[in-house]
Amino acid sequence: MGTLQSDAPRTAGNQVFLARQPILDRQKQVHAYELLFRASSTAPTAETMSSTATARVITDAMIAFDLDTITHRRPAFINVTRDLLLAGIPTTLPAKRFVIELLENIEADPEVVAACKALRDAGYQIALDDFQLTDRTAGLLPFATFIKVDFIRTPEAAERQRVIAAAREHGCLPIAEKIETVEQFEAAVAEGFDFFQGYFFGRPVTKGARDIPADKIAHLRLLQALHDPSLTVHKLESLVKHDASLCFRVLRTVNSAAFGQATEINSIKQALVLMGIDTVRRWVSLWVMAGLNDRAHPEVIDMAAIRARSCELLALRQDGPDAASGGFLLGMCSMLDAILARPMETVLTQLPLPKETQAALRGEDTQARRLLDCTIAYERGEWDRCLELAHKAGFDPTALPAAHRDALRWSAEFLRA
């Protein structure tokens, strides 16, 4: 299978719109990520692009975005059209790292069957997207490792069971798609699905007591203090010194290989000066968020980090340095209802925030809310809505890919730390 060649112009790396969606197993551990992409703010989606254009975008995306940063060394599902399937998958996509996902309109004609056999012989795994069991698609089952079933497009449990039974006959693993609520996840588990894709894990579960425990309120107050516009190195040092775990993390980070210190740093003040107040503010904020998390899925913290950094960079570009910290706080706090398992309104009563941030978190149509909604739409691969919101908010949509790419890298550094 040769690498596709094209005389089409190469896509600039920072113009590749690329996001990811986790695929979880029955224990809610991340098994893989599906990569969602678009060539640029004006290009069509992957489903409607030509095979050469799609291949070029995939290749350029893998150059611009470090694969390990995107997937944390987990498998990457990537959609291909019939044309691209028949033209051949670029050899730049290593078989051990990628799962080739065939779009739902691909049928098992002789050309497709031959291409699937070649893929399997080359070591690739194949997934069938939004699979509907018909005479025209059944011939794909012998080549598939995964079969995806869309809970919205296949609402009848009996039909889902029929697809699962056919999958099991061929040794395929069923994935439930569009799982957006805990109830849907529990139903999919009961029906026998092995994997689950959707944002159910990030939905706030608000059963039980509404009051936030005192220890978490202390964390929330620390979070508020960290984003006080008048925060100085002296004040930040005082905040960090009162928490032994934060002291340890700051010192461990500043003495890590990333900072390359010749001698060990033992002073919090010295560490703050070397790392910089904004860097410490971000890292400590996320450590506080992680400390709040005893119920939500770990992926939620990763999402909060990416969203916070994306909002920070977009706010910086749009309104300057004074707005950047507010953007970071907004993106991070947008996940607090999921992390604390409380309605956002309850969280806001315990966490005094700037009025504009509170309004945005309540869902009011403000400039800050448009920025947040645009960032969320990007991370979910809802490209058309994302671009509409960007224009509505009055900022350049071409800034989105670079901000998200930087946020992915920054979050990966945070997780390693």
Image: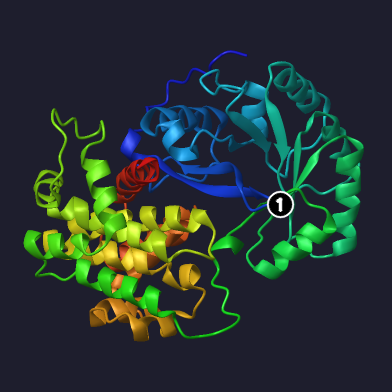
Q: What is the secondary structure assignment of the residue under circle 1? A: loop
According to the picture, the residue beneath numbered tag 1 turns out to be 26
At a point 24% along the width and 49% down the height, the residue shown is: 250
The kind of residue on which mark 1 rests is: Arg
In the figure, residue 344 lies in which quadrant?
Answer: bottom left
Q: Quadrant of residue 360?
A: bottom left
Is 191 rendered above or below residue 226? above
Is 259 positioned to the left or the right of 137 in the image? left
Can you give x and y, in whole percent of width and height, for residue 17 in the image?
A: 41, 44
* Labels in figure, total: 1
Q: 10 Å neighbourhood of mark 1: few (<14), some, or many (≥20)?
A: some
Q: Quadrant of residue 410?
A: top left
Residue 388 visible (yes or no)? no
**Which quadrant, please, contains the N terminus?**
top right
Reply above or below: 248 against 319: above
70 above or below 273? Answer: above
In the image, what residue occupies the spot 29% across and 71% down?
368
186 on left or right of 305: right
x and y, in percent, of residue 172 in the image: 81, 38
Seen from the viewer's position, the closer of residues 370 and 231 is: 231
Is residue 391 visible in the rendered image? The answer is yes
- Percent across and percent down for residue 277 are 13, 54
Residue at 21% over, 58% down: 281
The percent coordinates of residue 413 (x first, y second) are: 34, 41
Which quadrant, please, contains the C terminus? top left
Q: Nearer the viewer, residue 337 or 88?
A: 337
Q: Is residue 393 left or right of residue 382?
A: left
Of residues 46 and 321, which is closer to you in this image?
Answer: 321
Camera-side residue of 163 and 312? 312
Q: Which colour style is shown?
A: rainbow
